[in-house]
Image: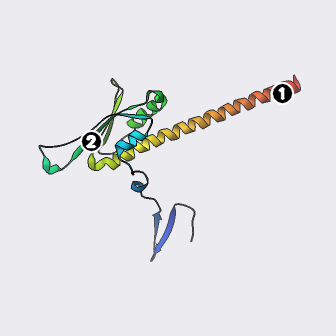
């Protein structure tokens, strides 16, 4: 039984199970460090990257990371949407804060949660790109529609005017 959808039924005895075919997100997306990803994105400007452990509690063996960055001032529309997306929620263990007074962002996470932080910021960026691509297409469609209506009005004037 073949199917074009992402789900393929599997028969094991009398029980039917659905298996979803997906590629590993770690192989596809997380092939560079979070800092290098930020450097590759034109929208973001890294101000500071720091990490520290907890010397008073060495048994925890945890490293906490901070990335301070700015969003390019030319991307003001994206910045407003970015701030809105941040307010929708964040994964557990990842904190992204906006500091309005100094116009910077701080991404905080434990080193073992770097993948979660990466996926969070990567998905935010992807949503921004999708939204602005949609806005470009919508503007082109509206412009084309207005041009068509103007041509139609001119034609009507010539025919009946």
> Alpha carbon of mark 1 to alpha carbon of mark 2: how far?
66 Å
From the viewer's perspective, tell me whether residue 65 is left or right of residue 149.
left
Which residue ends up furthest to the bottom in the rendered image?
13
Which residue carries the number 1 mark? 156
Between 103 and 92, the residue placed more toward the observer is: 103
Between 6 and 79, the residue placed more toward the observer is: 79
The relative height of residue 43 versus residue 154 in the rendered view (above or below) is: below
Q: Which mark is residue 65?
A: 2
Say which residue appears at 29% left-offset and 45% top-offset.
93
Q: Name the image quarter holding the C terminus.
A: top right
Given this view, does label 1 or label 2 mark the residue nearer the observer? 2
Which residue ends up furthest to the left in the rendered image?
56
Q: Residues within 10 Å of mark 1 (few under 14, many from 20)?
A: few
Residue 129, given in percent of the width and then of the height, sits at 50, 39
Residue 1, given in percent of the width and then of the height, sits at 56, 71
Say which residue appears at 48% left-offset and 29% top-offset.
77
Between 109 and 91, the residue placed more toward the observer is: 109
The relative height of residue 100 versus residue 30 in the rendered view (above or below) is: above
Residue 104, given in percent of the width and then of the height, sits at 35, 29
Q: Quadrant of residue 134?
A: top right
Q: Residues within 10 Å of mark 2 (few under 14, many from 20)?
A: some
Q: Quadrant of residue 26?
A: bottom left
Count of numbered marks: 2
Reading the chain from its start, which is encountered first: label 1 or label 2?
2
From the viewer's perspective, tell me whether residue 97 is left or right of residue 143.
left
From the viewer's perspective, tell me whether residue 20 is left or right of residue 134.
left
The relative height of residue 8 versus residue 103 in the rendered view (above or below) is: below
């Amino acid at each position: 039984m073949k199917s074009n959808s992402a789900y393929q039924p599997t028969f094991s005895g009398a029980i039917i199970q659905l298996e979803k075919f997906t590629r590993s997100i770690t192989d596809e997306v997380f092939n560079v460090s979070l800092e290098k990803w930020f450097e590759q994105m034109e929208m973001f400007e890294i101000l500071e990257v720091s990490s520290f452990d907890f010397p008073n509690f060495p048994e925890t063996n945890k490293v906490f990371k901070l990335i301070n960055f700015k969003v390019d001032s030319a991307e003001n529309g994206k910045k407003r949407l970015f701030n809105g997306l941040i307010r929708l929620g964040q994964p557990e263990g990842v904190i992204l804060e906006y500091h309005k007074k100094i116009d910077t962002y701080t991404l905080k996470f434990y080193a073992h949660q770097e993948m979660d932080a990466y996926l969070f910021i990567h998905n935010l960026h992807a949503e921004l790109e999708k939204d602005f691509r949609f806005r470009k297409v919508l503007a082109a469609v509206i412009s084309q529609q207005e041009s068509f209506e103007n041509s139609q009005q001119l034609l009507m004037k010539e025919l009946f005017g």
